[in-house]
């Protein structure tokens, strides 16, 4: 839930931007600041009307050997893969090889509710299929090669979470099965389908079905920040596990080429694209989207093995921006907000990274509790772990907060700043430039 809200607020910022003079120097300053303060490692690309107008990289693909990232660096893009898979499925539908109404039982009849689940349900995450990445043993089997039979056998042990079409709930299983269905129809592997339908037609050179990371091919390793030091992530997902739900590797530039091609009619018809962009049930087909002030933005985010990514396309402005990080402190959401604000110089001020303010554990007690707002979709709960204040939302992740002033905290990962008024038991959340007031229950 909190991911959706972060992206929603991101979109609010994006769509209020008006076209002004491109400000490359400010963009450079922002990424130089991130690099100097060790707030992330990764690459960004901006396309305007089909032309790349900005590209830069910070950090390393291999920290131990001091190999720096550049515009050709390949990253795991995670769930942005789903936009590619959705495009392939829509192409098959256009070729009358499949229908949105086709039942899952035509291919996998033993899966729970297969006789009620349609291709359309899976594309829009309305199937109720159990999310296999939430399996209790997922961390054990995700790092080894898995056959289709092994993956399906796990799914056969799981009941559906809800009746198909009842609601929208994100499940990687949807796009795993869609990958298998595409393979059945085409008589090819997902990798071969990706190559013939997207990579070759678009002339992509740095996009592929992922394999083991090879730094000699300018492929990035991933890192996580522990005790203010980058630590390499040693265990990586075997790509036989996510397939069309998250197995693609690419560069921000080539992800932008793909998105620009999708929205300019080079991959599917305008009629199919309109269907993909329909988010009336909560999700589009391989796309998330929101409407603000009469403008729309579409995209997808991704996260796999410490890599985090986000792509957003603004049809009215014909702008697409992608950020992929292999070491993340400031979230991709927050990075893209800063990118677009600095790109257009919209009253933009560079972020300030100060040394954290330390609190004794008893000093945090005054902030603890549940806070609610009339203008925010869910309540936020504040707890503590030793000397760290923790923010959490129902059914969402937890965020450790860092103090920056007497009653103020922030999370670079969430792109959030929180200021308390302890006298009035209130709190103001600033998320990517938007302020929301809360009251303690």
Image (spheres, helix red, strand yellow):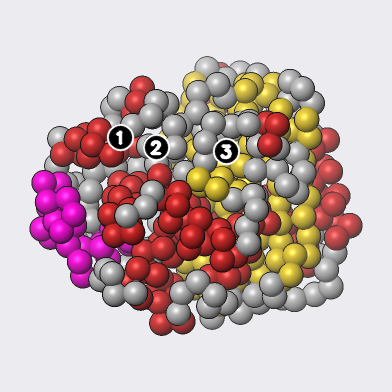
Foreground residue, 310 or 215?
215
Foreground residue, 180 or 383?
180
The reply to whether residue 186 is in sight is yes
Quadrant into which the C terminus falls: top left
User: Which residue does the image show at 62% across and 23% down from the upper left?
Assistant: 232
User: Which residue does the image show at 23% across and 48% down from the upper left?
Assistant: 129
- Toward which corner of the image does residue 82 lie, by quadrant? bottom left
**Which callout, 2 or 3, points at the residue further toward the start of the chain?**
2
Percent position of residue 262, x then y? 53, 70
**Viewer-side label of 1, 3:** 1
Q: Which residue corresponds to mark 1? A: 147
User: Which residue does the image show at 25% across and 63% down from the upper left?
Assistant: 119
Question: How busy is the neighbourhood of tag 2: few (under 14 within 10 Å), some, or many (20 plus)?
Answer: many
Q: Which residue corresponds to mark 3? A: 307
Q: Which residue corresponds to mark 2? A: 240
Marks 2 and 1 close (CB-CB < 8 Å): yes
- Toward which corner of the image does residue 371 lie, by quadrant? top left
User: Which residue does the image show at 75% across and 65% down from the upper left?
Assistant: 52
Question: How busy is the neighbourhood of tag 3: few (under 14 within 10 Å), some, or many (20 plus)?
Answer: many
The reply to whether residue 405 is in sight is no
Segment tinted magenta in the rendering: 100-126
């Amino acid at each position: 839930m909190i991911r959706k809200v972060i992206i929603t607020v991101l979109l609010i910022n994006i769509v209020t931007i008006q076209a002004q003079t491109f400000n490359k120097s400010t963009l450079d300053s922002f990424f130089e600041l991130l690099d100097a303060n060790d707030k992330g490692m990764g690459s960004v690309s901006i396309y305007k009307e089909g032309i790349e107008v900005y590209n830069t990289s910070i950090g390393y693909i291999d920290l131990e050997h001091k190999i720096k990232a550049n515009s050709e660096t390949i990253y795991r893009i995670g769930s942005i893969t789903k936009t590619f898979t959705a495009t392939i499925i829509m192409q098959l539908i256009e070729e009358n090889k499949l229908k949105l109404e086709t039942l899952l039982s035509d291919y996998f009849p033993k899966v729970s509710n297969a006789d009620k689940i349609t291709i359309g349900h899976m594309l829009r995450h309305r199937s109720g299929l159990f999310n296999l990445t939430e399996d209790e043993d997922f961390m054990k089997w995700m790092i080894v090669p898995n056959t289709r039979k092994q993956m399906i056998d796990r799914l056969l042990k799981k009941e559906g979470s809800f009746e198909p079409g009842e609601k929208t709930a994100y499940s990687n299983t949807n796009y795993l099965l869609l990958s298998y269905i595409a393979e059945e129809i085409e008589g090819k592997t997902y990798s071969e389908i990706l190559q013939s339908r997207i990579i070759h037609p678009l002339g992509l050179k740095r996009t592929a079905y992922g394999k083991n990371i090879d730094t000699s091919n300018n492929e990035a390793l991933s890192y996580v920040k522990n005790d203010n030091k980058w630590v390499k992530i040693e265990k990586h997902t075997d790509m036989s596990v996510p397939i069309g739900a998250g197995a693609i590797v690419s560069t921000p530039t080539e992800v932008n080429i793909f998105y620009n091609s999708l929205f300019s009619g080079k991959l599917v018809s305008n009629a199919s694209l309109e269907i993909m962009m329909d988010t009336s049930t909560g999700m589009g087909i391989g796309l998330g989207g929101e409407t603000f002030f009469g403008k729309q933005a579409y995209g997808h985010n991704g996260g796999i093995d410490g890599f985090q990514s986000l792509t957003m396309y603004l049809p009215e402005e014909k702008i697409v921006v992608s950020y992929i990080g292999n070491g993340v402190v400031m979230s991709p959401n927050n990075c893209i907000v800063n990118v677009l604000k600095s790109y257009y110089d919209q009253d933009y001020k560079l972020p300030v990274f100060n040394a954290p303010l330390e609190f004794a554990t008893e000093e945090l007690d005054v902030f603890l509790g549940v806070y609610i707002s009339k203008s925010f979709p869910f309540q936020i709960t504040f707890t503590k772990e030793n000397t760290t204040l923790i923010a959490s939302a129902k059914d969402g992740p937890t965020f450790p907060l860092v103090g920056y002033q007497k009653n103020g905290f922030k999370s670079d990962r969430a792109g959030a700043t929180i200021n308390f008024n302890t006298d009035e038991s209130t709190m103001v959340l600033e998320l990517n430039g938007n302020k929301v007031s809360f009251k303690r229950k």
